[in-house]
C-alpha cells in the first residue's frame, strides 16, 4: 500500500466510526450505513455521508417503523404457523420461534405504549 491509500483508508475508518456513533446515539434513525468494504449497501461511500444532511429523526417516523416491524413479525409468524398447520412445511421449530419473536415484539410494543400513556397522563396532570 502506498501513503495515499493508507490515508484514504484512515479517513474511511474515521467516517465509519462517526456514522456508527450516530447510529449508537440514535438507533431508530434507519439511516443506511455504508462501508468501504461492503459495496452496494446504500450506494454511498463514507466520504459522501454528511451527518448534517442526514436529517433528524421524527417521532412519527420512529413509531411507524416500530409498528411496521412488529406487523412484519406477526405476519411472518402467521405464514409459518399456517404452513405447518396445512402440512406444507415441517419446520415446527421455525414456526414456534417466529411466533415467540412476534409475541415478544408485541409485548415490548405494549410496554412502550403503556409507558407513553402513563407519561402523557403525568404531563396532563402537571399544574400550569
Image (spheres, helix red, strand yellow):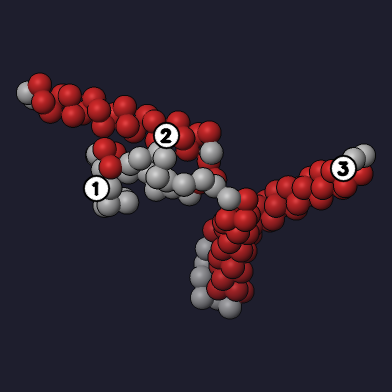
Marks 1, 3: nearer the viewer: 3
Label 3 sits on a secondary structure element that is: helix
Q: Secondary structure at mark 1?
A: loop
User: Mark 2 — residue?
Assistant: 20
Q: Nearer the viewer, mark 2 or mark 1?
A: 2
| Residue wearing tag 1 | 39
Q: Is residue 10 above or below residue 60?
A: above
Q: Are marks 2 and 1 in contact (CB under 8 Å)?
A: no
Q: Please name the residue shown 42% across and 34% down the image.
A: 20
Label 3 vs label 2, nearer the camera: 3
Check disc 3 and report the residue beneath it. Answer: 122
Q: Is residue 28 above or below residue 67?
A: above
Given residues 43 and 92, the one toward you in this image is 43
Q: Residue at x 33, y 41 (%)?
A: 49
- Give how far across and how far down residue 91 sits, in percent: 52, 63
**Quadrant location of the N terminus?**
top left
Neighbours of disc 3 within 10 Å: few (<14), some (14-19), many (20+): few
Please tell me which residue lies in front, 87 or 39: 39
* Image quadrant assignment for residue 15: top left
Residue 92 visible in the snapshot: no
Q: Quadrant of residue 69?
A: bottom right
Quarter of the figure that contains the C terminus: top right
Label at residue 23: none
Picture residue at 26% right of the left edge, 38% below the top = 47
Calculate the distance from the C-alpha at mark 1 to the C-alpha at mark 3: 48 Å
Q: Residues within 10 Å of mark 1 (few under 14, many from 20)?
A: few
For label 2, count other residues whose C-alpha is less than 10 Å away and answer few (under 14), some (14-19) or many (20+). some
Residue 68 picture quarter: bottom right
Front residue (pair 80, 40): 40
Amino acid at each position: 500500500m502506498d501513503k495515499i491509500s493508507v490515508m484514504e483508508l484512515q479517513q474511511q475508518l474515521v467516517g465509519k466510526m462517526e456514522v456508527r456513533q450516530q447510529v449508537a446515539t440514535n438507533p431508530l434513525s434507519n439511516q443506511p450505513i455504508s462501508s468501504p468494504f461492503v459495496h452496494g449497501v446504500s450506494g454511498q461511500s463514507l466520504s459522501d455521508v454528511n451527518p448534517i444532511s442526514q436529517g433528524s429523526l421524527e417521532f412519527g417516523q420512529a413509531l411507524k417503523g416500530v409498528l411496521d416491524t412488529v406487523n412484519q413479525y406477526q405476519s411472518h409468524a402467521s405464514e409459518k404457523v399456517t404452513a405447518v398447520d396445512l402440512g406444507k412445511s415441517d419446520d415446527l421449530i421455525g414456526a414456534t420461534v417466529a411466533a415467540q419473536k412476534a409475541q415478544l415484539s408485541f409485548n415490548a410494543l405494549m410496554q412502550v405504549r403503556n409507558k407513553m400513556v402513563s407519561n402523557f397522563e403525568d404531563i396532563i396532570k402537571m399544574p400550569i
